[in-house]
Image (cartoon, helix red, strand yellow):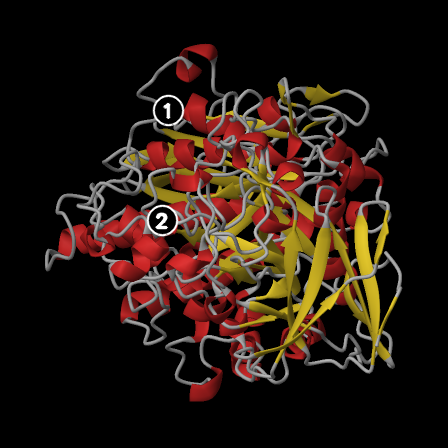
Amino acid sequence: MIREGSPHPRGAYWDGKGTNFSLFSAHATRVELCLFDARGEKEQVRIELPEYTDEIWHGYLAGCQPGTVYGYRVYGPYAPQEGHRFNPNKLLMDPYARESIGQLSWDHACFGYTIGHPDEDLSFDERDSAPFVPKSVVVDPTFDWHRIQKPSVPWDRTILYEAHVRGYTKLHPRVPAPFRGTFAGLATPEVIEYIRSLGVTSVELLPVHAFVNDSQLLERGLTNYWGYNSIAFFSVDPRYFADPMLGVQEFKEMVARFHDAGLEVILDVVYNHTAEGNERGPTLCFKGIDNFSYYKLMPEERRYYINDTGTGNTLDLSHPRVIQMVTDSLRYWAQDMLVDGFRFDLGTILARSPDGFDNRSAFLKVCSQDPVLSRVKLIAEPWDCGPGGYQVGRFPPGWAEWNDTYRDTVRDYWRGEASAAALAPRLCGSADIFDRHGRKPYASVNFITAHDGFTLHDLVTYNERHNEANGEGNRDGSSDNRSWNCGAEGPTDDAGINALRERQMRNLLATLLLSQGTPMLLAGDEFGRTQQGNNNAYCQDNEISWLDWNFSPLGERLHEFVQQLIALRTRYPILRRSRFLSGEMNERIGVRELTWINATGGEMEREHWDDSLMLCFGLILDGRAQATGIRERASDVTVLIIFNAYHDVVHFTLPTHAGETAHWRLWMDTNRHGDPAESDSAAFSSGDTYDVTGRSMLLFSMDSAAARS
């Protein structure tokens, strides 16, 4: 028997005796709860929710247990021109569902209008969509975390590692076959030990919210591999479960194992749009529950959607119930699932007001003051497709941001298209972009590659994209790759070109991991993974996207090199300062925090900076630089980094430091394999000349004379 229940909490909440159902809809006239068999195939009963409180429909069903499959049918006006698209013939997912079952089958019955009708989306379709759509599932939220604590990695020690749940383990030979491509696969000891031994601290997973495969992709025999097409913001996509019977418990177990290893879990989240598309899209959830409230509609023509996302619709976070849903979802993942942070896809949209981007928008204010959200890592992709969408550096304190200026400049420098003057600020945390309002260098998330674009290997192997497998005539994906194939397009047997490609990969990796700011490494780049030149593999759920764990000799060398780089970053705190370093003398402590030098060993002068052909230079980071707001010298090691994007050898005179002879120990030369510090020739002094190979990079630490002897 259905009882009144409560409007809180939203969604389906099991209390041990029954389940409370609660659904927001400001414009509905009636809501039916539909219960299905365990497989979600047969509708067994419809129950009208009896109460309507503060625009919340609710009811309590005694005896309703976890595992119950359900959906909603919502009644109200079907008036698309007024922004309303209610159609009770369409079964709808619960926006707050903690679990879902089934995948969307693209039948015409999934649409609220009749496809092919002369009135198009103004028509009304009476077919039942229930056989073709995903359903929601009641869950038991209990899980024994065994007092596991979040790692809470400080930002200055954070190294992000972007990975895909399915692609990471699909071909992993040490993961049991049934677990490959799932959360259980990621949680296997061998996988976790590999990630931990690499030295990264925080694994950023591509979207795991339940999502929909686009019909046009399925028609081409492809799929939405990346998952940026969410339909349920509280539900894990069931295709990532090894055991669907465990459901969310499997995700929690993965998080627990990561935390055991000291690794954070960051989720890439898509709160800017949904899978329902525009007026011609299907009716699966929000569109049928309260289209007028959930989506941004054209003010003068509410039949149509504002499309700042490029996907057909835009969630309306200016509506109090919509922003509540998004923040409830974030808190759920942070508190119930113990996720450590979030990366927000097209983050600018979340801060849009009628006048454009507003870094004091309601959503950003909520995040900054919320006692839960303000304590997790918040990372913005600070752009979208709408007017004024590019907002790098303009998010408020407490946020980090993907820094594509860093990506583009570093790529350009190492292909000889950007000068020392362009690269210098990117190496130092991009202070010109982020040094305001007390933000720190780690607000800049530095990256060379990400899921979207070339892999590191392909960045030095292809000048042009090769996306033919996507079935779009090689027209999709960016043509602005800032890549260089080193002399041949694609794989080659030319030993000289292959050696240069390897050195370029090492240069890019070293730049990334030795720059101030928060580095993000794309999974697989540490061993030279290729996508055969595909720079938009969003639809490739196959060997193009899956990581191949059979390392080549090149892969073995790169993997060892990345481990060494991360160890160096960890060893030398001056490489990851939480203060912006300055080239001016810090008079209070008598230290010049950084010094730029040229190949003669002297300081860079204005004419050097103005020289667009200046491609070889050095940077001294003084380990005594003030480390915190307390005005005192630090006692860290001083390092010297030399960059040479020139095509030939440069005879570089090693500099003095603070007016005195310095003794330098070489730790890295991207032209050499192995650990240079193990060689007797690794020790140098001021005035010594080092032959810096064309297109290479060096790292030295400064020894005391006693230590050198």
Q: Nearer the viewer, residue 391 or 31?
A: 31
Type of residue at label 1?
Ser
Residue 419: which numbered mark, if any?
1
Residue 606 image position (x, y, % from top left)? 46, 11
Q: Residue at x 49, y 72 (%)?
A: 239
Label tally: 2
Dot 2 lies on which element?
loop
Q: Nearer the viewer, residue 28 or 266?
A: 28
Q: Residue at x 67, y 38 (%)?
A: 293
Type of residue at label 2?
Ile
Residue 469 image position (x, y, % from top left)? 21, 56
Q: From the image, which quarter does the C terminus lie in?
A: bottom right
Q: Nearer the viewer, residue 406 or 576?
A: 406
Q: Residue at x 38, y 55 (%)?
A: 214
CB under 8 Å between callouts 2 and 1?
A: no
On screen, residue 554 above or below 292: below
Q: Which residue is mark 2?
A: 115
Q: CA distance from mark 2 to mark 1?
A: 56 Å
On screen, residue 303 above or below 572: above
Residue 620 placement: quadrant = top right
Q: Residue at x 78, y 48 (%)?
A: 373
Q: From the image, which quarter does the N terminus lie in?
A: bottom right
| 497 sits to left or right of 669 | left
* Residue mark closest to the camera, 2 vs 1: 2
Q: Mark 2: few, some, or many residues within 10 Å (few <14, many ≥20)?
A: some
| 266 sits to left or right of 672 | right
Residue 375 image position (x, y, % from top left)? 80, 49
| 510 sits to left or right of 647 | right
On screen, residue 236 above or below 634: below
Residue 524: which numbered mark, if any?
none
Label whose residue precedes the other's in the sequence (2 or 1): 2
